[in-house]
Amino acid sequence: MSETELPDNRMSARIRRYLPSLLSYMASSGSLIMASVAQLATFAILARFLGAAEFGMFITIMAITSIVVHICGIGSAESLLRRVAQNKKIYPVMLGHNLILIGISGALLVAAGMLILPYWIEFSPDPVTNAISLFLYLVTNIVLLRMILLAEAVYIGHSNFKAANLSVVGFALARTLAAVLACIVFGVSTINGWAWWQFACHVLVAGIYWLFLMRLGKPIFRIMREEIKLGIFFATPFIFRAIRQNIDLLLLGLLLSPAVIGSYGVARRIVDSSYLNIDAMSRLLYPRFAKMSANGIDKAWPLAQKATLMALGISVFTATFVYFLAPYLPLIFGQEYQSMVYFTQVLCWVIIFYALWSVSVEVMGSAGEHGYRAAILNTGNIIGAPILAFATWLMPPTGTFISIYLIEISIAICAWLVLLRLMRRAKQNSV
């Protein structure tokens, strides 16, 4: 073999080494992007057929339930993913653990919503119609959604990323199909009519996914008490983050017109969807972080460094793409949503700071350091929510934008300071 052939051989060996990871990421991100596109298509259909006023009301109930859904199950999905990734034999017990917590917490949350929300939201002047629609939205967007999302966690825990990707894409396409049938085919134009279609769609998807999950093993109904505390630690950051991310929508709904709320809501949904490229990487790396950090969080440091560089590159590319896409959005959603162009272009750069802190908290979570992870995210969100609310009330929507960036930057700085401290401590203990 000549010397000139050596670089080619080394390059081909390197390609063979990283090709499986690259293909896995492309499949993972591709599935999430497809799901995001399908979700935006669903929003576009609903925005056009429901009209600005009813669509603004739909955005409001979505904002509320997107907070509450993180309470349902009390973080048990992460426990399943982590424990099954380490030992697949424990899957039946962890599945039963999830179902018990989803059932109990879901019933309590729906009951609380039925008592509280009628004083805030009115879908119809008829009390019976209003109660039925509210019940359908709560059950659909809390209990059924949590059951459907459980399937993705199960497949990732089993390292079956193909099935996990298909579950995400299938659910998104089912919702889009439901919107097409409801609005375009059957002419549904009210939020009350859409409640029935959305409920039926979620019931059908949940039923199909349950049949597939049964192939992996039937649940053993048992509470894993040691996982409840970890589940709470894992869930609370998502709860407080959801509150912080939706407090602006709820306040702007009181301060601005429904059309502006609809535009801002869609812009927020687009920006939130842009996080999926980072989430796609995280869902692939989380099981690897969990295995590497089993003997100390410092063992995951080399992979964490590479993941951070990858996340930054992905986030910059995604933010730039969304910025230049924004002017074309009214062509899709309708001309009454013109202000979404400005909203989207201002908010799209938030993903860069999300990418910075997401890797560090994923490493902490996979290493079982949920206390530190929860302390960082909960503190940022608990302090950030009132700051965001005050800034939104004082100077809407400019104050909203400024506070969002300040909060994300602060969380990124704190997350990395804590992770580096944990790494140093683990390295010292292993010496």
Image: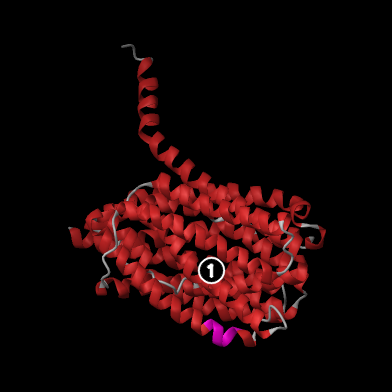
Image spot of residue 44 (x, y percent): 70, 57
Q: Quadrant of residue 175 in the image? A: bottom right
Q: Nearer the viewer, residue 265 or 106?
A: 106
* Residue at left offset 36%, top offset 63%: 78
Image spot of residue 413 (x, y percent): 47, 65
* Residue at left offset 38%, top offset 25%: 12
- Could you tell me which secondary element the residue under label 1 belongs to? helix
Q: Determine the main secondary structure of the stretch shown in magenta.
A: helix
Left/right of residue 247 with respect to residue 144 in the rendered view: right
Q: Is residue 368 visible in this depiction of the protein?
A: no
Q: The N terminus appears in which quarter of the rendering?
A: top left
Q: Amino acid at mark 1?
A: Thr
Stretch in magenta:
113-117
Q: Residue furthest right?
A: 335
Q: For residue 115: magenta?
A: yes
Q: Work out whether 133 lies above or below 291.
A: below
Q: Nearer the viewer, residue 328 or 44?
A: 44
Q: Residues within 10 Å of mark 1 (few under 14, many from 20)?
A: many
- Name the colour scheme: secondary structure
Q: Nearer the viewer, residue 142 or 182?
A: 182
Left/right of residue 47 with respect to residue 426 in the rendered view: right
Q: Quadrant of residue 97 in the image? A: bottom left
Which residue was labeled with disc 1? 140
Q: For residue 170: magenta?
A: no
Image spot of residue 214 (x, y percent): 34, 55
Image spot of residue 173 (x, y percent): 57, 51
* Residue at left offset 65%, top offset 80%: 130
Q: The C terminus appears in which quarter of the rendering?
A: bottom left
Q: Nearer the viewer, residue 369 or 223?
A: 223
* Residue at left offset 73%, top offset 64%: 263
